[in-house]
Image (cartoon, helix red, strand yellow):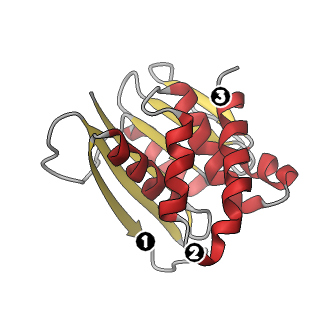
Amino acid sequence: MREDIVFAGFGGQGIMLMGKALSYAAMKKGWFVSWMPSYGAEVRGGTAHSMVVISDTPIASPVVKDPSICIVMNKPSFEKFESRVKKNGVLIINTSLIENGTGRRDIDVLGIPATDMASKLGNPRVGNMIMLGALLSRRNILPVPLLIDSLKDVIPAARQNMISINEKAIRQGHEYGSR
């Protein structure tokens, strides 16, 4: 088993947290993991992406050129990564910010209004967790409770009060992606 994953969006959308949370959960499962963040010129508001490789064998490089899974949170990220997703891969699109979907028929595509759903939960910043939950519904990499458990390791101590809303967001995204 090997998954090469790219999470991409604007700075401030929790792109790094998505990669970090999934990485920690995969480590707890006993997989080999690499996580590599990449920031644009600006941290908040600029583009950012993180690359995660999860494997049952050692990983030679953390660089993901052609992802098997890609989550895009904004239009510039969609334009950059949509064509790179491997055949039979998964592309999850935040339709709250990306109007036109892909024309590709060789991949599994899920459009999910993550930002809108997060706003209805009371915090537009948990759209990233909605997307992670949706990912776990499309590819059974890890159990949802393991991802939720990893939040306490990656959310700073001053924001531990955010774990419960992040848990709700993950579960809601998983439910949406399972339809």
Looking at the image, residue 29 sits to the left or right of residue 149; the answer is left
Q: Nearer the viewer, residue 56 or 19?
A: 56
> Which residue is under mark 2?
157
Q: Position of residue 97 (x, y in %)?
A: 71, 51
Q: Residue at x 71, y 30 (%)?
A: 176
Between 110 and 82, the one nearer to me in the picture: 110
Mark 3 burial class by Cα count in 10 Å: few <14, some 14-19, many 20+: many
Examine the image and state in which quarter residue 3 appears.
top left
Q: Residue at x 42, y 31 (%)?
A: 141
Residue 137, x across and y down, in percent: 57, 28
According to the picture, the residue beneath numbered tag 3 turns out to be 177
Q: Residue 2, position in %: x, y?
A: 27, 32
**Crowding at label 1, few (<14), some or many (≥20) Cα neighbours within 10 Å?**
some
Q: Identify which residue, 9 or 175, lies in the foreground.
A: 175
- Single out the mark in the foreground, 2 or 1: 2
The amino acid pointed to by label 1 is: Tyr
Q: Pick the quarter of the image with the C terminus.
A: top right
* Secondary structure found at label 3: helix
Q: Nearer the viewer, mark 3 or mark 1?
A: 3
Tell me the kind of residue under disc 2: Ala
User: Looking at the image, is 149 positioned above or below residue 15?
Assistant: above
Q: In the image, which disc is placed on residue 39?
A: 1
Instruction: Measure the alpha-carbon separation of dots 3 and 1.
Output: 28 Å
Residues under labels 2 and 3: Cα distance? Answer: 30 Å
Task: Say whether residue 36 is visible.
Answer: yes
SS under mark 1? strand
Residue 16: % across, % down: 48, 63
Q: CA distance from mark 2 to mark 1?
A: 23 Å
Q: Looking at the image, can residue 103 be seen?
A: no
Q: Residue at x 51, y 80 (%)?
A: 42
